[in-house]
């Protein structure tokens, strides 16, 4: 996990450095941290042989939260470019990645997904001259599925895999927020692009079942600026 985040940070700030060269050396570059609470919605689609009793199609996360870091490059008084990295975790109904409870002797008590992300946003300050600044922002991001946790008999087991699902999932986000000095708050919508968690699985010899899980959600995010520098 540390190696993945290290490469994500280097990649993001390489892009920020390019932006700094492109837009001049006199703009402010700010760095900060963020924390968020989310509510995720999932749609599970199956292709191929019919799904038996117990198949999960639509479900919501039970507890979701995240944290991250960002760099904001002010291109002008109204516009800025943001590079961001993050970690998030979502507690979901059990058996969303497999039907473990129906084949194992011990029933699942809890399932939690863990993901890393990196992305870029363009922010526009609608009100930029007052003490409290109003802004909108939108961008693209990539989510990397780190693994999932299962709780059985009050014992937790972590699996560093995606259980035959795709790990890297492209996505997008859009938000509206307020900035006051070092403190910011933002409401954000985020979703996957295309089929998330897509996989192929062979069942009963020649029968092929394909499955995809689409994720989208809303979050409330709080940010805090740690320091800024002049380019």
Image: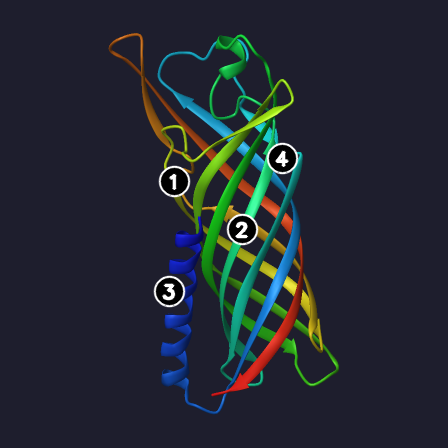
In the picture, the disc for residue 42 is none
Residue drawn at x 41%, y 82% as measured from the top left? 20
Label 3 Cα neighbours within 10 Å, binned few <14 / some 14-19 / many ≥20: some
Name the outermost residue toward the front.
155
Disc 3 designates what residue? 11
Q: Which of marks 1 and 4 is nearer the N terminus?
A: 4
Disc 4 designates what residue? 61
Whether residue 51 is situated above or below residue 83 in the rendered picture: above
Name the outermost residue toward the bottom.
26
Q: What element carries label 1?
A: loop
- Quote the CA–CA distance across marks 1 and 4: 19 Å
Residue 185: % across, % down: 70, 64
Q: What element carries label 3?
A: helix
Whether residue 84 is situated above or below residue 167 in the rendered picture: below
- Quote the CA–CA distance across marks 3 and 2: 16 Å
Disc 1 designates what residue? 167
Disc 2 designates what residue? 87
Residue 112: % across, % down: 57, 33
Label 1 Cα neighbours within 10 Å, binned few <14 / some 14-19 / many ≥20: some
Please say if the residues under marks 1 and 4 sit with CB atoms less than 8 Å apart: no
- Quote the CA–CA distance across marks 1 and 2: 14 Å
Whether residue 38 is situated above or below residue 67 in the rendered picture: above
Q: Which of marks 1 and 3 is nearer the N terminus?
A: 3
């Amino acid at each position: 996990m540390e190696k993945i985040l290290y490469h994500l940070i280097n990649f993001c700030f390489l892009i920020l450095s390019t932006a700094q060269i492109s837009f001049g050396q006199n703009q402010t570059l700010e760095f900060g941290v963020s924390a968020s609470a989310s509510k995720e919605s999932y749609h599970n689609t199956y292709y191929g042989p019919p799904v038996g009793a117990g198949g999960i199609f639509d479900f919501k996360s039970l507890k979701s939260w995240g944290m991250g870091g960002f760099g904001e490059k002010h291109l002008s008084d109204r516009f800025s470019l943001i590079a961001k990295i993050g970690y998030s975790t979502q507690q979901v109904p059990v058996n969303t990645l497999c039907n473990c409870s129906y084949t194992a002797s011990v029933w699942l008590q809890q399932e939690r997904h863990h993901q890393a992300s990196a992305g870029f946003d363009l922010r526009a300050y609608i009100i930029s001259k007052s003490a409290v600044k109003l802004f909108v922002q939108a961008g693209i991001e990539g989510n990397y599925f780190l693994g999932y946790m299962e709780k059985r008999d009050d014992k937790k087991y972590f699996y560093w895999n995606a259980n035959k699902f795709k790990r890297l999932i492209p996505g997008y986000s859009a938000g509206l927020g307020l900035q006051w000095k070092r403190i910011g708050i933002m409401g954000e919508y985020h979703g996957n692009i295309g089929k998330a968690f897509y996989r192929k699985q062979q069942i009963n010899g020649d029968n092929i079942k394909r499955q995809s899980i689409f994720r989208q959600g809303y979050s409330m995010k709080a940010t805090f600026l740690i320091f800024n520098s002049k380019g």
